[in-house]
Image (cartoon, rainbow, N blue to C red):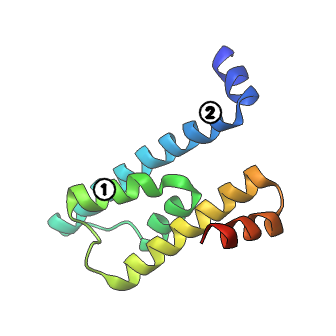
Amino acid sequence: MYVLNTLAENSALLVAAIYVALSLSTFTLYYFDKSAARSGRRRIRERTLHIFSVLGGWPGALAGQQLFRHKTRKQPFRFLFWCSVCVNLVIVGWFYVGDISTLASWINETL
């Protein structure tokens, strides 16, 4: 109960915990998909991998791609992966800023 109260009081800690959990899950999905690809078993859908990435598991996806040398050559997949990273970062930025126009202004000033 203490852990849940601490997470609820500190949104940054909550977001970090979600990223860690989703990254570990996504990393595991990449492991199982690579294993299935090697042995000819049923694969995990690319859509599923992208959904986990856009929800916040993209750090684990990136680590899995590099460590397992998986999904690194398919350009359409890579393009959608990086789009999912951008979407996730915009959503998290919007969560912290609270207003999409303020976030857009900040992005324009930064770039």
Q: Is residue 35 in sight in this rendering?
A: no
Q: Which amino acid is tagged 2?
A: Leu
Outermost residue on the front side: it is 109
Q: Which residue is mark 2?
A: 13
Indicate the quadrant where residue 101 lies.
bottom right
Residue at 70% in and 36% down? 11
Outermost residue on the top side: it is 2
User: How far apart, in angstroms, are the residues tagged by discs 1 and 2?
Assistant: 24 Å
Above or below — where is 31 with respect to 47?
above
Residue at 52% in and 65% down? 85
Closer mark to the observer between disc 1 and disc 2: 2
Looking at the picture, how far across and down is residue 93, in whole percent? 68, 57
Say which of 25 and 3 sits in front: 3
- Residue 95 as seen in the image, left or right of residue 26: right
Say which of 93 and 79 sits in front: 93
Looking at the picture, how far across and down is residue 66, in whole percent? 25, 60
Q: Which amino acid is tagged 1?
A: Gly
- Residue 100 as seen in the image, left or right of residue 86: right
- Residue 56 as seen in the image, left or right of residue 1: left
Looking at the picture, how far across and down is residue 2, in whole percent? 67, 14
Above or below — where is 13 with respect to 59?
above
Return the disc, 1 or 2, that comes first in the chain's sequence.
2
Residue 64, numbered label: 1
